[in-house]
Image: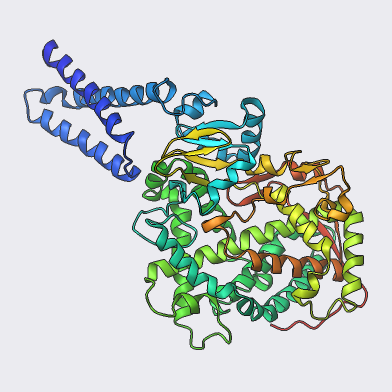
Amino acid sequence: MPPPGVEWALYLGSAVAGTFTWSVLHRSSIQGDTAALAYFCAYATLYAVLYISSLAENAFSISLQIMVAYTCSALLTTSAYRLGPWHPLAHLPGPPLARLSSLWLTCVSLRGRRHLVIDRLHARYGVFVRIGPNIISINSPAAQQIYSAATRMLKSDSYRAPGHDGVVALFFKQQTEKLHSDRKRVWGQLFTKEGLAQLTPFLERRTFQLLECLKRRQAKNPDQGVNLEECLYHWSYDFMGDFVFGGCNKLEMMKSGDPTSLIEGGKSAMILLDSIGQTPWLLDILWRIPLGGSMHRMARLGENLMKTRLQAAEYPSFRDLVSFLTEDDTIPERDLNLDALVAIQGGSDNTSITLTLAVFFVTTEPKYSQRLRFQLSEVFSDPTGPFPDDKLNRVPLLDAVINEALRLGSPFFLLRIVPVGGVVIDGQYLPADTIVALAAYTQQIDPDNFSPDPLSFRPERWLPEELGSSGTTNRAALSSFSSGPHACVARQLAYMEMRHVLARLVLNLDISPVQGFDPEAFRGGIMNMRTTILEQPFMVVVRNRRGTDVAVGG
């Protein structure tokens, strides 16, 4: 053992180093994998120095004790700052564990009930709640401004693409706002009126295939019913395969299922990005170890899908998304791979789950399915004929059902960084670099925005002539597609898909939950982690309605 004076000097030096580390890191960030590597390199170096010195006999134990002292010093200093009165957000309330570490938010997110936890916290603490060392959830309509172009707030690091290799993709955080706007402009070429119109025949064909898929699977399992969520996921991936890759990859999940586990892998990757992403340094580490395997598998799958499209012997007969992304050969291959994966995963996941919830609501409250069928039949005398989008727009209850399903089923959590100079929201000043988010779910069930019965499915609230003078519907409080520079570029396509599918299902099929289905248990089992997980599958009985048979190609 070293002399007592030397031993204490070593421990004191390590404690000072820990405090110095805090003083550096609380002003600037470092990637988690880089920090972990530096930490272990420091330990190895310390051990090596001690090993070649007169302390070689105790090199391991001394170096370990020094690193423990260093770590404890850094953690204690960090904790004192975050919990003490010196922190710029100290005056805002929140759970002590949340103020101490972002790991609290990660744990809450992994359980899939983050929106419910945040809702309860706002009921307890008020408009502003500190849900992380530097993260504020805001339950106020005024918080919508954080997503506007005027405030120029960037996405938080929870949107950073893992691997931090400079890849640019639409969904993820970019190094500059120009990179985002330039890429969004490329995507936007497909979401014009003309671009969407060319997709209608493929949407019609895939939707008829969905009807046949449901009937075929019902015939195979007459006693158990059909997993509607699974069928809708298979439909959405098949259609997005057309939309993104021109059908070159021939996913054909409605025929063959999902042998490569594209859906499961995509959901697993999104859960990690959403939940572990609340602690960005931890996501950096996860990316480098086997536990991050689902993210790597999805990255490889995106690469393979793009390679198949680019090497296809025949180009699609219409302009798919890849044709726009590759038009001027300026987008690197790794960007193309991730953009394509974002498109097919993001475009499939939210649309299919919203449709699942919409069908759940209208079938568990049959008065709405009956009303919707009546309104649709007045516009479409032939349920197997074309469904032009302009005619679907004449069915007010159709969009009302979709909007109500979005309101109750899209508790999205969209984090932004306060820019230099800070911002005032609802009378509260928030300093620069604070991470802020609208409490979207709480706003979407707030009686001040939606009444009466904000927790109930009531699509008539979106029809002003039916709501009555005593009701309230604040359309601006629905945040499913966000707003401002980072608003969902595919909003029009999503509505077009949902209108077509919901109208076809209602007019062509009789769908009802299987016997013994518990609607309350189903709703209680809905989890959200940037993707939605249903703990209880929505099993339904499907019956063909008379006079609705149609030949389906493809």
x and y percentages locating residue 193 in the rendered image: 64, 76
* Residue 112 appears in the rendering: no
In the picture shown, does residue 68 fall above or below 299?
A: above
In the picture shown, does residue 534 fall above or below 553?
A: above
x and y percentages locating residue 258 in the rendered image: 61, 65
x and y percentages locating residue 459 in the rendered image: 82, 53
| Quadrant in the picture for the C terminus | bottom right
In the picture shown, does residue 71 fall above or below 218?
A: above
* Residue 244 appears in the rendering: yes
Task: Place residue 355 in its image quadrant.
Answer: bottom right
Which residue is situated farthest in the top direction here?
Answer: 4
Between 216 and 475, the one lying in front of the other is 475
Q: Residue at point 77% right, 74% down?
A: 390
x and y percentages locating residue 164 in the rendered image: 35, 54
Q: Residue at point 90% right, 71% down?
A: 377
Horizontally, is 483 left or right of 397 in the view?
left
| Colour mapping used in the image | rainbow
Horizontally, is 366 left or right of 252 in the view?
right
In the picture shown, does residue 209 fall above or below 510?
A: below
Count numbered badges in the picture: 0
Q: Residue at point 63% right, 28% down?
A: 126
| Quadrant in the picture for the N terminus | top left
